[in-house]
Image (cartoon, coloured by chain):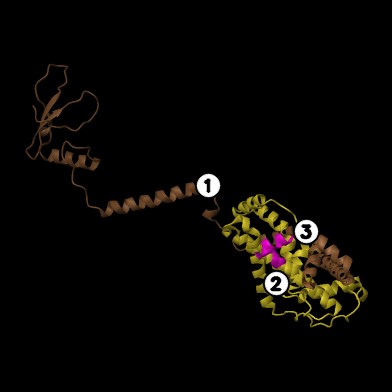
Chain colours: A yellow, B brown
Amino acid sequence: MSEKSSPANEAALVCAARQGDKGSLQALLARHWLWLKGLIYSILRDSEATEDALQDVCVLVLNKIGGLREPERFRPWLARLARNVALSQRAQQSRRPGPLGEDTPAAAGPSVSDVLDRQEQSRRILEGVHALPDKYGEVFVMKYVQELSYGEIAEILDIPVTTVQIRLVRARRMIYNRLTGLPNNKVPRT
Amino acid sequence: MNEAALEILISKHLDGEITPAEERLLEAELERNPQVRRLLQELREVHELSQGALRGELVEAGRSPGEVFAAAAAQQGGRGGWRFRVGGLRGAAKFAVGAAAGFLVGWAAFAVFQRSSPAPDPAPAGEGTSTLAERRDEQASFDAGGGEQNRPRPLKAEPAGVLPYYFSYGDPAGGEWLLEAYPGNEVQPAAYQGDL
């Protein structure tokens, strides 16, 4: 569950962090830790690489927090920073998973639970998440890792709420199609 | 209702973002259409599996925020620690820094101006106050012009114990001055009113 906080409270923490209060900065990062981790993971698709990137993001935040002009825009600022770090690391690694549907999907027909046991289900779900295009993957992971609302995700990623909603629908459908072997063109268009 | 709109409703239902009106619409479709019921069931399963898989991968694994932050702070500290920024100072400190900077700039500008500007003309006698340097020049001029002989002399002889009030003085340039003495311990510029 996401930790709710008043914008004023968060802005006060950001102001203190800008003046060098590391405790406030740590509190801010802890508050946004899960979605931050999810956002990086959605790009790097690897939990170990995500841990390394998180540390780099923290260093960058420590160095750059003083330059943040609008304290109330801390979350989108943090998301941009994290996305840039993750994209840069991915470019260095130069190993991207194949496009959606590259792996052999399960045969069409039976339901998801009929086909897979629990561990296998988790593995296949993660494969499906990794295969999502970036813009769907980041929304999907942020939603599930911290149960953020559409509005919160929209604010962090600086996109409209309806875009978040549509991306979630399509991401869920892509994973569903992958698990059940349905063709990928069967994704709702709006 | 088309399939895309239905799927959006199902998605909003799973995410807890559905409105009461949309919920009623979805319920009506579920009552009417078994395929919608199956789709809901399948997407709910994907929803729950995704939640479990991602939480296992990210929430229950990895270092805590405190550990990562401490490592990052150590890494950042090795690069020179927190940088000093005027923008990060509190109001009073910012004012003090600004005032000090303003004073230094003003002082430097004054010094430069003083050096580059020509020496001012000496103030005419009897007008305004003179600087210490000008007074030293006057003293030297006085000494060169005869010293004690040129010292102001009482205009008239006074009885013993009475201080003279008017003095006469002839400057080296030949000018004649009438000086008015003040009983107090002050120095005032002399002025000739033209009515004596």
Looking at the image, which residue is at 20% across and 25% down?
Answer: B182
Specify the label residue B19 is tagged with. 3
Q: To which residue does mark 1 refer?
A: B91
The kind of residue tagged 2 is Lys
Q: Which mark is residue A135?
A: 2
Q: Are marks 2 and 3 on the same chain?
A: no
Q: Which mark is residue A114?
A: none
Mark 2, Cα crowd under 10 Å, few <14 / some 14-19 / many 20+, is some
Quadrant in which the C terminus of chain A is drawn: bottom right
Q: Disc 2 sits on a residue from what chain?
A: A
Subunit of mark 3? Answer: B
Instruction: Give the distance between the C-alpha atoms of the residues marked 1 and 3, in whole angstroms.
Output: 47 Å
Q: Main secondary structure of the magenta part?
A: helix
Position of B39 compared to B188: left or right? right
Q: A35 or A56: nearer the eye?
A: A35
Out of A116 and B14, give the one closest to the viewer.
Answer: B14
**CB under 8 Å between discs 1 and 3:** no
Can the viewer see residue A169 in this picture?
yes
